Image (spheres, rainbow, N blue to C red):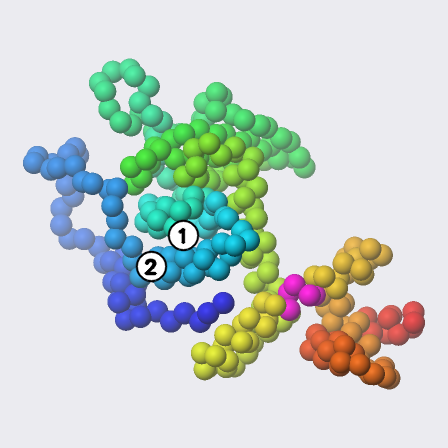
C-alpha cells in the first residue's frame, strides 16, 4: 500500500468537471437527429487519464511480483470504473474486467435482423426484460430475486459486453430495483460473474475493520514513509485478528474484534513470565491489540 497524492493536472481536471456540472449552458438545444456532415468517431482507442495510468503502473508491478505463483485472469472494479477507459486499461494489462454499470445504462440488444440493417437493436427496458434471458429466480424473506444474462451493446463500448442484470422485487409492496454487472469475458457464466464481483466486498470489509479497530484513520503521521508504515500495519492487523478469532468463535459465534482486544488486554494485565523471544513477541502483540472493555475482561478473568 502506498500513499497517493494527486498532481496539479488531476486537481485541475476534477475542479473543471465540478464547475461544468454547476454551470448551465446558454446555447440553444440542438435539434433531434444527426447533424449534417458529421462523421463516425473511432472509440476503440482512448487516452488514459492520470488516475488510470497510476493504477495501470501499480497493477503491472503487482502482476510481475506474483507471476511466479499466481496468474490472475480477472480484475474486479467498482462502478466508478465501469467505463471503456478502464476496459482498455485492463485489456492492456492482459486481464479481463468485471465491473458495474449505472442503473440507467444505455444498453441495447443486438440487431435482430428485422428492418433496416443497423448495429443496435431495441433499447433494454429494465422493467420488462424478456423471459428468454432469465437464468434463475429465488424467493427469500418476502423478496424475489431474478437473474438475467445476455450479450448486450453499449453506446460507449465498441465491443459487445457480457451483462448480468439482477432484479430484486418486494413481493408485498411490489417495489423493485436492479443492479447491472458486466464483464469483457463473453464466455463467463453468470454465477461466476456474480460470485467474483461479490468477493470485492471482502476488501471493503477489510478496510472497514482497519479503520474501526486498528487505527487506519486515526494516525497523525505526515511523512510518506511513516504514513506507509502506519497504513500497512493497520491493514496487516486485520489478518492475525481474524485468525485468532477462529478459536473463540467455536464456542461463541458472535465473538468480535472488541472481545479479542479485551481478552488480550486482560491477559496482558495478569502476571506472565516471559522466558523466550516468542513470549516477547506475543506480549507485544497482545499489548498492541488491547482495548479496555471491563465487562469482557471480568468474564474472562472470572472463567479462568
Categorize mark 1 by other alpha carbons within 10 Å: few (<14), some (14-19), many (20+).
few
x 56%, y 56%: residue: 203
Element at badge 2?
Answer: helix
State if disc 1 and disc 2 touch (CB < 8 Å): no
Of 18 and 154, the residue lying toward us: 154
Image spot of residue 206 (x, y percent): 59, 60
| Residue 228 higher or lower than 160, as above or below | below
| Residue 53: numbered disc | 2
The span shown in magenta is: 237-241
Task: Please indicate whether residue 33 sits to the left or right of residue 270 in the image.
Answer: left
Element at badge 1?
Answer: helix
First in residue order: circle 2 vs circle 1: 2
Image spot of residue 29 (x, y percent): 16, 43
Residue on which disc 1 sits: 80
Image spot of residue 39 (x, y percent): 12, 37
The answer to whether residue 29 is visible is: yes
Q: Is 84 contained in the magenta span?
A: no
Residue sticking out furthest to the front: 68
Prevailing secondary structure of the magenta residues: helix
Amino acid at each position: 500500500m502506498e500513499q497517493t497524492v494527486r498532481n496539479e493536472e488531476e486537481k485541475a481536471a476534477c475542479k473543471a468537471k465540478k464547475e461544468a456540472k454547476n454551470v448551465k449552458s446558454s446555447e440553444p438545444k440542438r435539434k433531434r437527429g444527426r447533424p449534417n456532415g458529421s462523421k463516425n468517431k473511432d472509440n476503440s482507442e482512448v487516452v488514459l487519464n492520470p488516475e488510470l495510468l497510476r493504477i495501470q503502473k501499480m497493477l503491472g508491478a503487482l502482476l510481475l511480483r506474483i507471476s511466479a505463483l499466481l496468474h490472475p485472469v480477472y480484475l474486479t472494479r467498482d462502478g466508478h470504473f465501469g467505463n471503456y477507459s478502464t476496459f482498455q486499461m485492463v485489456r492492456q494489462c492482459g486481464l479481463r474486467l468485471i465491473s458495474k454499470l449505472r442503473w440507467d445504462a444505455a444498453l441495447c440488444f443486438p440487431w435482430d435482423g428485422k428492418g433496416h440493417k443497423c448495429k443496435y437493436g431495441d433499447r433494454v427496458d429494465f422493467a420488462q426484460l424478456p423471459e428468454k434471458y432469465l437464468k434463475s429466480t429465488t424467493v427469500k424473506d418476502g423478496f424475489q430475486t431474478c437473474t438475467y444474462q445476455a450479450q448486450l451493446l453499449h453506446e460507449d463500448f465498441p465491443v459487445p459486453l457480457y451483462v448480468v442484470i439482477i432484479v430484486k422485487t418486494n413481493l408485498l409492496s411490489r417495489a423493485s430495483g436492479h443492479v447491472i454487472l458486466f464483464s469483457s469475458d463473453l464466455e463467463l457464466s453468470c454465477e461466476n460473474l456474480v460470485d467474483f464481483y461479490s468477493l470485492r466486498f471482502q476488501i471493503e470489509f477489510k478496510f472497514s475493520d482497519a479503520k474501526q479497530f486498528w487505527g487506519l484513520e486515526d494516525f497523525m503521521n505526515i511523512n510518506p514513509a511513516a504514513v506507509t508504515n502506519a497504513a500497512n500495519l493497520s491493514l496487516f492487523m486485520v489478518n492475525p485478528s481474524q485468525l485468532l478469532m477462529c478459536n473463540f468463535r467455536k464456542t461463541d459465534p458472535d465473538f468480535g474484534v472488541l472481545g479479542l482486544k479485551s481478552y488480550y488486554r486482560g491477559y496482558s494485565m495478569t502476571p506472565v513470565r516471559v522466558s523466550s523471544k516468542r513470549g516477547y513477541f506475543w506480549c507485544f502483540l497482545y499489548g498492541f491489540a488491547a482495548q479496555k472493555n471491563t465487562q469482557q475482561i471480568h468474564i474472562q478473568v472470572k472463567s479462568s
